[in-house]
Image: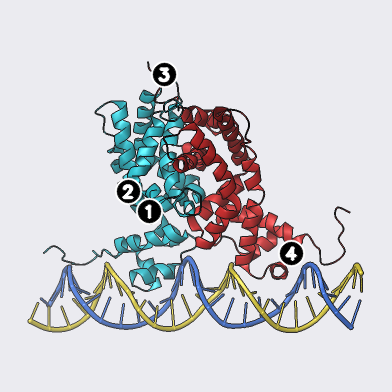
Chain colours: A cyan, B red, C blue, D yellow
Amino acid sequence: MADKRPAGNSDTAQVILNKSLPLFARSGYAGVSMRDIAKAVGISGAALYHHYPDKQSLYVAAMAHAFADKASSIQSALGNTGSPEQRLERFVTSFTKQMASDPDFRALLHRELLDGDEKRLKLLAENVFIEPFKAIKQLAQEMALDCDAHLLAISMAGLILFHFETQAIRRYLPGGLKKHNDPKVIAQHVISLLTGAIGSGSRQ
Amino acid sequence: MADKRPAGNSDTAQVILNKSLPLFARSGYAGVSMRDIAKAVGISGAALYHHYPDKQSLYVAAMAHAFADKASSIQSALGNTGSPEQRLERFVTSFTKQMASDPDFRALLHRELLDGDEKRLKLLAENVFIEPFKAIKQLAQEMALDCDAHLLAISMAGLILFHFETQAIRRYLPGGLKKHNDPKVIAQHVISLLTGAIGSGSRQ
DNA sequence: AGCACCTTAACGAACGTTAAGTAAGATGAT
DNA sequence: ATCATCTTACTTAACGTTCGTTAAGGTGCT
């Protein structure tokens, strides 16, 4: 009853997106062939063209699929109750946890920032990041009235994302410990940095 | 005396690296063909194999070439005179300027962080980043005794790099202005953030 | 002569994509 | 209920192109 399949109602198109996403995340657009995707799905290469007109369209659909719902889940992390400090803490811990749990999303995001043409970046910005960014910027504005809110909002996201981006190479840098990949540790560090614990407090 | 060229000493091998680097930076390893490189250099595709045994070796040589001397120039930005605050300011302004002036290096760095296998990342870490990272970590330690220096050093680099990484998409995010791509503005923002101007000062 | 450096031509493999055909279920007239 | 017909979802085989790479040979300096 749950899954009748009368006709013209296959979920293969969705399966293709789900199976191709980790491939694109790992190897990038040029690094994944249509045959790779077909093999991952378990169908012939030609069958892909029954669902998507070409590789480019499949890729764009996969990206849209990957980024869908991310906007709201990022934004909902902020809420609008409590003091700015509380909201900052809530956002940083939640965003850090989300990024930690979705390495494919992170990789695709970085790839789009590197390779995305104007059209794709505009789509990504307007459909995914504008709304959460607005909320973060608003928070930034409340926290530091004299500081450029746009720059500060970018800094918040960057602080978190860069720790994950450097996860692989930090194993070869001095002082790199396993705990530095713990979302809770990262979040705590970012919070204390953003609340001014570095330059002002803890004088010896 | 400086540049004799007796025999078996063409600079074509160097030209190949210099011409292929922007291609790899823009399109990644899989996105650049040997024929693309050959055309950029102005020789036949087969001639590349006179200087490098295969595409992989050419790529690794190009990366080594791109990252050579970066280590010392980053590190020398710190120096070891003056107060920690002065050294921080010197490092941030200098590092920001260096990154602003070398988009290819930035792109290659991000690509290696995304795609680099264990061996390449280890090479990159040990030959390029270990020494400057040690110096930055040392600075971090002096600035915030109670904070994890490894995390703080990563944060310093990430704050700067992420502003450049998001340069293209910020045009579509609210509050994005041309001045936010000015190295001096970015550096000033990062410095004020790291010296604790956010959470502590400027209460209304 | 011999080596360094380059060419054109070509190899087989893999690429994105299309053509042609098949199996299975839905549809509609009888 | 049956049969022809249509659509959906796929298959195998092949198309022309481009890929990394090699073979064979030419030119010019030492």
The CA distance from mark 4 to mark 3 is 61 Å
Q: Is residue B170 above or below residue A61?
A: above
Q: Is residue A154 above or below residue B47?
A: above
Three-letter residue code for mark 3: Ser
- The tally of labels here is 4
Q: Where the C terminus of chain A falls, by quadrant?
A: top left
Left or right for B42, reference C3: left
Residue at mark 2: A68
Judging from the image, mark 1 belongs to the subunit labelled: A
Q: Is residue B52 above or below residue B200?
A: below
Three-letter residue code for mark 1: Pro
Residue at mark 4: B43
Judging from the image, mark 3 belongs to the subunit labelled: B
Residue at mark 1: A103
Judge the density around disc 4: few (<14), some (14-19), many (≥20) Cα neighbours within 10 Å. some
Judge the density around disc 1: few (<14), some (14-19), many (≥20) Cα neighbours within 10 Å. some
Q: Are marks 1 and 3 on the same chain?
A: no
Judging from the image, mark 2 belongs to the subunit labelled: A
Expressed as whole percent of the image width and height from the top left, the position of residue B61 reads: 65, 60
Residue B202 bears which disc, if any?
3
The CA distance from mark 4 to mark 1 is 41 Å
Element at badge 1?
A: helix
Judging from the image, mark 4 belongs to the subunit labelled: B
Left or right for A72, reference B172: left
The CA distance from mark 2 to mark 1 is 16 Å
Of badges 1 and 3, nearer the viewer stands: 3
Of badges 4 and 3, nearer the viewer stands: 3
| Residue in the foreground of this view, choosing between B150 and B166 | B150
Question: Marks 1 and 4: in contact by CB < 8 Å?
Answer: no
Q: Are marks 2 and 4 on the same chain?
A: no
